[in-house]
Amino acid sequence: MNDKDKLSVLYSREEIASAIKSLAQEIKREYKDKKPILISILKGSFMFMADLVRELDFPLEVEFVRFSSYGREKKSSGEIKVIQGITFDVENRHVLIVDDIVDSGLTCNFLKKLLTDKKAASVKVCALSIKPSQHTMPVNIDYSGLVIPDKFVVGYGLDFNQKYRNLPDICILE
Ligand code: IMP
Ligand code: MG
């Protein structure tokens, strides 16, 4: 850890775990008989995905895509780099996008369109957290847990310059 960065806990590991339990209950109601594909957007949502699927006790598949839009900044560049795209079949499948945080909404809408174009039976979004102040386009989030103020956060998978993903709490980076 860098001594110069000031971190303060916004959501503790206990609060995160309890938000995930509630999300899992809602998701189960909708998907328990649909054998959905859960698609995690790497890298940020790796930890959320791992914890979420362990709360889901019905048949499902997991897949991953990897996008990058932040580079080394605290603001989205507005351009999405596809590092690993959709390498699996989604036609006629129910898919649930699993994202760590919806900020501008760009990433989520981009992936939704790709999946719709590939003829998924349904496409919904589950975001652990949302930053409503930063939505730059309408974005429909079907399941969301935590609300983040207009601050940059790290931890629980979220990074700044690839640092802090391993923190168990979600912290504000001053
Ligand atoms: P978008 O602006 O909604 O496209 O968000 C793109 C991605 O940027 C998110 O899925 C996160 O991985 C990352 N991101 C957005 N806000 C933050 C933040 O406050 N801290 C760390 N990563 C963030
Ligand atoms: Mg992300």
Image: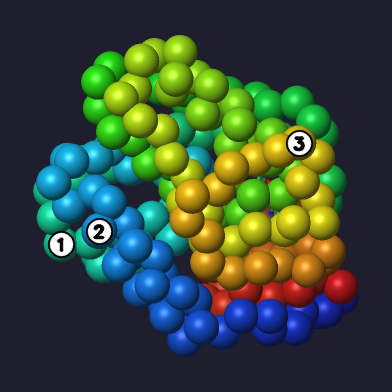
Q: Quadrant of the N terminus?
A: bottom right
Say which amino acid is labelled 3.
Answer: Met
Classify 10 Å Cα crowding around label 2: few (below 14), some (14-19), many (20 and above). Answer: some
Q: Nearer the viewer, mark 1 or mark 3?
A: 3
Q: Which badge, 2 or 1, is on the more N-terminal residue?
A: 2
Say which amino acid is labelled 2.
Answer: Lys
91 vs 161, nearest the viewer: 91
The residue wearing badge 2 is: 28
Q: Nearer the viewer, mark 2 or mark 1?
A: 2
Determine if residue 94 is in view. yes
The residue wearing badge 1 is: 57
Q: CA distance from mark 2 to mark 3?
A: 28 Å
Q: Quadrant of residue 3?
A: bottom right
| 87 vs 6: above or below | above
Disc number placed over residue 137 in the picture, else none: 3
Q: Position of residue 41 (x, y in %)?
A: 49, 41
- The structure residue drawn at horizontal position 34% and vertical position 22%, both measured from the top left corner, is 120
- The structure residue drawn at horizontal position 35% and vertical position 30%, both measured from the top left corner, is 122
Q: Quadrant of the C terminus?
A: bottom right
| 22 vs 117: above or below | below
Q: Position of residue 107 (x, y in %)?
A: 63, 35
Q: Which badge, 2 or 3, is on the more N-terminal residue?
A: 2
